[in-house]
Amino acid sequence: MERVVILGTGGAGKSELARELGRRTGLPVVHLDVVLWKPCWTRGTAEQDRCDFAAAIGGERWILDGDFLSVPDGDVRFERADTVLFLDFRRSTCLWRVFKRLVRDRRRSRPDLPEGCREGFDLALLRWIWRYPRVDRPRVLALLAGLDHRVDVRLLRSRTDVRRYVDAL
């Protein structure tokens, strides 16, 4: 395990899993929210996103936390990855976790968020989580089905699945 991609909707636990894997493996953790979002939840130009994304996956070893299914100029993270973990949790679980995180992290910054971006809950986040099973999940499953057989793909559907995976490392 040298290059790991972690996918899932908001509240699935991508950042938490990335940090735990980083602690256990010594791999550097890259949070795509930090790479692709700018202060006050704004995005850079397509060119800036391309450069920032290329720099994020340019290393030989990393854990990449973030869904971002629409990266400019194609998404080579899957070509470079040797492990892909898809946190395929129920919508209700993810919504509950986002609400819990909102209360827990209010007025605090998180290392997986860009500077100047506060934890929040808005209609766009709610819509993303709500639509994920119908819109993004099929895209992720199709993408995973097309990956090279040498990539270790894991669908983790519960906290128990995640715990078992991490404990087996």
Image (cartoon, rainbow, N blue to C red):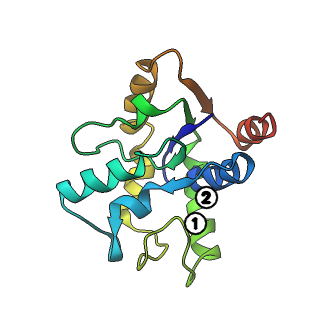
Residue 69 in sight: yes
- The residue positioned 55% from the left and 39% from the top of the image is 4
- Viewer-closest of 110 and 52: 52
User: Callout 1: 10 Å neighbours few (<14), some, many (20+)?
Assistant: few
Q: Are marks 1 and 2 in contact (CB under 8 Å)?
A: yes
Q: What residue sits 40% from the left and 23% below the top?
A: 142
Query: In the rendered image, which residue does mark 2 sit on?
Result: 96
Q: Residue at x 32, y 56 (%)?
A: 52
Quadrant of residue 77 within the rendered picture: top left
- Secondary element at tag 1: helix
- Among the 4 quarters of the image, the one containing residue 167: top right
Mark 1, residue position: 99
Local secondary structure at mark 2: helix
Residue 127 occupies which quadrant of the picture? bottom left
Pick the residue in front: 102 or 118.
Answer: 118
Q: Nearer the viewer, residue 10 or 93?
A: 10
- Asked if 20 appears above or below 166 in the picture, the reply is below
Kind of residue at disc 2:
Trp
